[in-house]
């Protein structure tokens, strides 16, 4: 593991030593939901770091598969913007990494506009149909359905939002015609591509029920009647057809007949038939809003508003501001203890209070209230404490929804030559979503992100199912700015509930321990949720692991390994440094690498 001392110090990351942290912290918090969404332009007189101007930035893409990166670079090379390239990346991910994301799923995106400094949050989160019921994930006895039963059920399918959302982002920030963004993915779907290791592994089946769904078996069976294997050339012509239609007809193609009709038919079949109707598709609209921002070590961290759980990530960072984690490093067990305990406090509140703000009152300001955070931070002691309950931030009382979920998600970052940035987390929920296909893509099972139980001991759960509501998400794409409002990083990860811990680890690595982005991503994952300390136990040096046991934390392997962090750091000297998580198949590549 790299030590803090060994890692290259990054000029811009040292800026945070200049000003008193607490003062800045309160400025950031005062600015939440208002000024923080639209920073003042940075000065260009030498007193602050100027924003990069057009043509100065190294354009590049960090994503979970090289073909998706190439598809994005191809669009950038044709003069496309980050928003244009994001469409191409998503279309390709749906082909080469369908276990994680696809055009039938949902997503959250943050866009940074280099010329104005404007940050825009886009939500393409799925909605529940009008016919959804609060008890639709309960069995006849009123008990929650088993997880394996629910995730392949028709009623798990939400109205897909990712392409309408990308359509909105591309319409606002794109430069190329929509129809020009699918060439690479149509080509690969129709001409074939080498089956990636991870896709082959998931197609081969395993402990997930999607492997038994006839659509999955059919899609991944080759002409010889065998399940596709890594390295063989595979085609998905039905997907190519769908993309051709999407290129021609626009971002709402899946929400309109005939494709919507086929989605409705497939989702209405057993097991657990759903209630989707055309009116649900007609009613769908992606949401564009301001980001919410909080402070950490004299930086400003921005995330999408709920139903993304980004606010919880901000709370965890705020809790860590009350520790001396930045005086420690990754080789210090106490630093990981602080990280773990802040995680537990964060998840306790997240599980209770985060849901769709169009339906319930989410106490965003309360969760980040300095006095409340300070009080909660007192629970971070010298040893792992007992299981914390959620606190009572200013706001309403809800019962918790605390299941651990993971695996069907991807994250990518695009930087264009003008310095515009897209950071986007995208998901079909679990592996291959429901396992049901239409037109070569998978139908999501995102509605299983709702609480299965509508109330606990008579107290309503904020994240209960309601018609038209969006389920709570752990997806939280991140943008980080320095004191001069200069963009310093864009990042994010898949990983279900663990996304928040993966993102927090990377931000701590970057800002508190001043690691390079790659070293920060490579740090062992530690996911502390409820009573469990999951993580990459064998990646912690022996003395750190022993030290953690002495502090009451016995890191258990088995969960917490499936991060897929991708990100980019912008150095003050103009260098752009991207990184990809070695735990997946992704890469970072620049236009210069590509053209060279
Ligand atoms: N559906 C999950 C969410 O939105 C993400 C699942 C995953 O990361 O695998 O929180």
Image (tube, grey):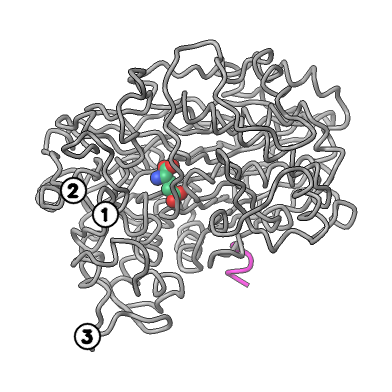
Q: Earlier in the sequence, mark 1 or mark 2?
A: 2
Alpha carbon distance from label 3 to label 1: 23 Å
Which of the pair 20/51 is nearer the observer? 20
Crowd class of label 2 (few under 14; some 14 to 19; many from 20; radius 10 Å): many
Q: In x, y percent, where is residue 191?
A: 31, 78
Q: Earlier in the sequence, mark 2 or mark 3?
A: 2
SS at badge 1: loop
**Residue 84 seen by the camera:** no
Q: In x, y percent, where is residue 276?
A: 14, 40
Q: Which residue is mark 3?
A: 225
Q: Which residue is mark 2?
A: 154
The residue shown at (32%, 80%) is: 228
Q: Main secondary structure of the magenta part?
A: helix
Q: In x, y percent, where is residue 351?
A: 47, 30
**Residue 269 seen by the camera:** yes
Crowd class of label 1 (few under 14; some 14 to 19; many from 20; radius 10 Å): many
SS at badge 2: helix
| The quarter of the displayed image where residue 446 is located | top left
Q: In x, y percent, where is residue 279?
A: 12, 33
Which of the pair 122/117 is nearer the observer? 122
Q: Tell whether circle 1 marks a residue whose Cβ is less than 8 angstroms from ligand 1.
A: no
Alpha carbon distance from label 2 to label 3: 27 Å
Asked if the residue under mark 2 is in contact with the one under mark 1, i.e. CB atoms within 8 Å, the reply is yes
**108 lies left or right of 440:** right
User: On residue 434, which mark appears?
Assistant: 1
Which segment did they paint magenta? Answer: 589-596
Alpha carbon distance from label 1 to label 2: 8 Å
The residue shown at (66%, 41%) is: 53
Q: Is residue 522 above or below residue 574?
A: below
Which of the pair 177/534 is nearer the observer? 534
């Amino acid at each position: 593991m790299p030590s803090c001392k060994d890692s290259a110090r990054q000029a811009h990351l040292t800026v945070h030593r200049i000003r008193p942290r607490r003062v800045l912290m309160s400025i950031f918090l005062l600015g939440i939901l208002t000024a923080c969404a639209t920073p003042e332009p940075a000065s260009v007189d030498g007193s602050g770091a100027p924003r990069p101007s057009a043509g100065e930035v190294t354009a590049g893409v960090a994503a979970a598969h090289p073909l998706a990166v190439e598809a994005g670079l191809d669009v950038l090379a044709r003069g496309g913007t980050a928003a244009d390239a994001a469409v191409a990346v998503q279309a390709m991910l749906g082909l080469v990494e369908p276990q994680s994301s696809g055009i039938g799923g949902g997503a959250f995106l943050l866009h940074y506009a280099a010329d104005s400094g404007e940050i825009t949050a886009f939500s393409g989160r799925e909605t529940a149909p009008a016919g959804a019921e609060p008890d639709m994930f309960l069995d006849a006895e009123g008990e929650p359905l088993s997880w394996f039963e629910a995730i392949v059920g028709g009623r798990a399918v939400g109205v897909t939002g990712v392409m309408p959302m990308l359509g909105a982002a591309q319409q606002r920030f794109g430069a190329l015609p929509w129809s020009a963004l699918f060439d690479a993915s149509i080509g690969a779907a129709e001409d074939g591509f080498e089956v990636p290791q991870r896709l082959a592994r998931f197609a081969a089946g395993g402990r997930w029920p999607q492997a038994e769904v006839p659509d999955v078996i059919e899609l991944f069976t080759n002409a010889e009647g065998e399940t596709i294997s890594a390295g063989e050339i595979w085609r998905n012509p039905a997907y190519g057809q769908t993309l051709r239609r999407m290129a021609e007809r626009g971002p709402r193609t899946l929400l309109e007949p005939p494709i919507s009709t086929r989605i409705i038919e497939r989702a209405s079949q057993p097991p657990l038939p759903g209630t989707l109707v055309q009116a649900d598709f007609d009613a769908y609209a992606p949401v564009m809003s301001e980001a919410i921002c909080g402070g950490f070590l004299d930086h400003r961290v921005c995330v999408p508003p709920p139903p993304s759980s980004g606010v919880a990530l901000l709370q965890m960072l705020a809790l860590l501001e009350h520790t001396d984690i930045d005086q420690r490093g990754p080789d210090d067990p106490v630093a990981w203890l602080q990280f773990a305990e802040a995680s537990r406090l964060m998840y306790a509140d997240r599980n209770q209070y985060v849901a769709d703000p169009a339906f319930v009152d989410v106490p965003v300001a309360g969760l980040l209230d300095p006095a409340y955070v300070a009080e909660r931070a007192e629970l971070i002691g010298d040893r792992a404490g007992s299981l914390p309950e959620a606190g009572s931030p200013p706001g309403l009382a809800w019962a918790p929804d605390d299941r651990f979920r993971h695996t069907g998600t991807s994250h990518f970052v695009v930087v264009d030559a003008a310095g515009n940035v897209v950071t986007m987390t995208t998901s079909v929920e679990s592996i291959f979503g429901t396992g049901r296909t239409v037109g070569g893509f998978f139908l999501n099972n995102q509605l299983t992100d709702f609480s299965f139980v509508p109330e606990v001991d008579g107290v309503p759960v904020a994240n209960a199912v309601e018609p038209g509501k969006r389920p709570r998400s752990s997806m939280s794409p991140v943008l980080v700015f320095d004191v001069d409002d200069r963009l310093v990083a864009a990042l994010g990860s898949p990983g279900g509930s663990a996304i928040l811990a993966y993102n927090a680890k990377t931000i701590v690595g970057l800002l508190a321990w001043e690691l390079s982005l790659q070293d920060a991503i490579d740090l062992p994952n530690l996911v502390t949720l409820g009573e469990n300390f999951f993580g990459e136990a064998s990646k912690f040096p022996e003395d750190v692991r022993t030290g953690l046991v002495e502090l009451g934390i016995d890191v258990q392997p088995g969960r917490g390994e499936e991060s897929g962090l991708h990100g980019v750091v912008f150095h003050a000297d103009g260098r752009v440094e991207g990184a990809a998580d070695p735990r997946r198949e992704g890469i970072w590549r620049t236009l210069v690498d590509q053209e060279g």
